[in-house]
Amino acid sequence: MEKTVFFNGKLIPLSQAKVSVLDRGFVFADGLYEVIRCYRKKPFALDGHLQRFKRSAEGIYMELPYGLDRWREICYELCEETDLGQFSLYLQVTRGPAPRDHRIPEQYEPTVFAYADPVSPEMEYRWENLSKAMTLKDGRWDRCHIKSVALLPNILARDEARRKGADEALWLGPGQVVYEGTASNAFMIEEGVLYTHPLCNKILGGITREVILKVAAELGLEVRQEGKTIQDFLAADEVFVTGTKREIMPLVEIDGQAVSDGKMGEWTRKIHEGMMEYIARDCGLDSCY
Ligand code: PDD
C-alpha cells in the first residue's frame, strides 16, 4: 500500500506530493526540518521538537505556516494513518516556490511536507553496538542551533566516516574542543561527571541531549555543560553520542584510538535504561517496545 504523507495542508498518497523545481528548498536549501521519534505510535517530546521548529523558523526569519497546535494535530494524524509500529516523523518546511533570487521574498507560500519514516531494525538496537567515530575540523556555519535542511557538510562528513570504517564524525572547534556529531550530540563521563558542550550557535540543542541531562542527574551523576577537547574524550571513562533516531550510541574508538577499554560503560548502560523508562513514562506506555 502506498504511503500517505502530509503535503501542503492535506494527507495524500506519496506519489501525488509534487514540488516545483523553483522551490527555494530545492534551489537554495532554504528550509527547516524536525525529526520526532515515536514509540508504539506515541510521539516522544513532541512539544520540545515543535518549540525548536519554531525557534529555527525565527532564526531564518520565516513564519511557520501553522500554529503549534495544528502541527501537533498533523503529527497525531500521521501517527494514526501509518501502519508502522516504530517510526519517526519527519517534518519539513521550505520557503516555497519563487523566482530564483538570493533575497528572501516579501511574500511566499511555504511548502510543507511531513511523513512517518520507519526506524530500521538495525537502528533499533544500534545502541548495543559499540561504535567508532572519526573527527574533523568544524567547517559548518555559525548557526548550527538552527535545524536547517542544508546538510551538505554533515552528509560529506558522514560519508568520509563511512569510508574510514567509522559510524559517526565528530566536529571539532578551536583548541580541538568537541562540538557535536554530524547528527548527534556528544557526551563523555569522567570520574562520575557527565560532560557535554554547552548550548550555543555551534551545536544543535538536541532534544535527546536534554533528556540525557535530566536522566543522568536523576541517576546521581554530576552534570557539567562544558566544552571538552578530543584528548579529554579519548582519556574519558565513557563516551557516547545521542540523537532522536539513535537514542544513545556508545563510542569505543575515535580516530583509531580505543576509548573506555573498547567496552560499553556501566553509566552508559544505566543512562540508556533510565532514558527508555523516561520515554515510556512521557509517552504513557508500560515500555517503549
Ligand atoms: N539529527 N546535532 C545534529 C547536527 C543533529 O542533526 C541532531 C539530530 C542532533 C541531535 O538532536 P536530537 O536529539 O534532537 O535528535 C544533534 C536528526 C535526528 C537528523 O538529522 O535526522
Image: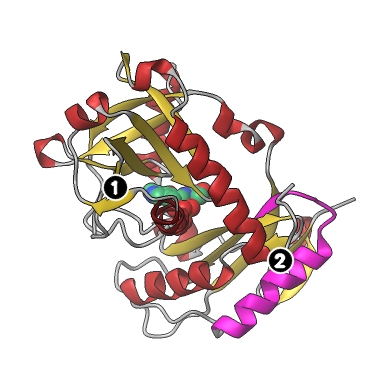
Q: Residue at x 39, y 69 (%)?
A: 56
Q: Are marks 1 and 2 in contact (CB under 8 Å)?
A: no
Q: Residue at x 51, y 35 (%)?
A: 269
The kind of secondary structure the magenta stretch mainly shows is helix
Q: Quick one: 3 or 86, which is closer to the camera?
A: 86
Q: Residue furthest front?
A: 220
In-image side of 283 versus 226 (left or right): right
Kindly state the secondary structure of the residue where label 1 is placed: strand
Tell me where residue 234 appears, x and y as whole percent.
25, 25
The residue to which callout 2 is attached is 284
Q: Which one is closest to the eye, mark 1 or mark 2?
A: 2
Residue 101 numbered tag:
none
Q: Is residue 132 magenta?
A: no
Question: Could you tell me the amino acid type at mark 2?
Answer: Gly
Q: Quadrant of residue 152?
A: top left
Kindly state the secondary structure of the residue where label 2 is placed: loop
Residue 271 in the image: above or below residue 70:
above
Label 1 beta carbon less than 8 Å to ligand 1: no
In-image side of 83 versus 158 (left or right): right
Label 2 beta carbon less than 8 Å to ligand 1: no
The residue to which callout 1 is attached is 196
Tell me where residue 183 appears, x and y as whole percent.
43, 44
Question: Could you tell me the amino acid type at mark 1?
Answer: Thr
Q: Quadrant of residue 13?
A: bottom right
Tell me where residue 163 appears, x and y as whole percent.
43, 18
Residue 97 visible in the picture: no
Q: Quick one: 258 or 223, which is closer to the camera?
A: 223
Tell me where residue 237 appears, x and y as whole percent.
31, 28
Residue 207 in the image: above or below residue 236:
below
In-image side of 187 versus 22 (left or right): left
The span picked out in magenta is 68-89
Q: Residue at x 27, y 59 (%)?
A: 199
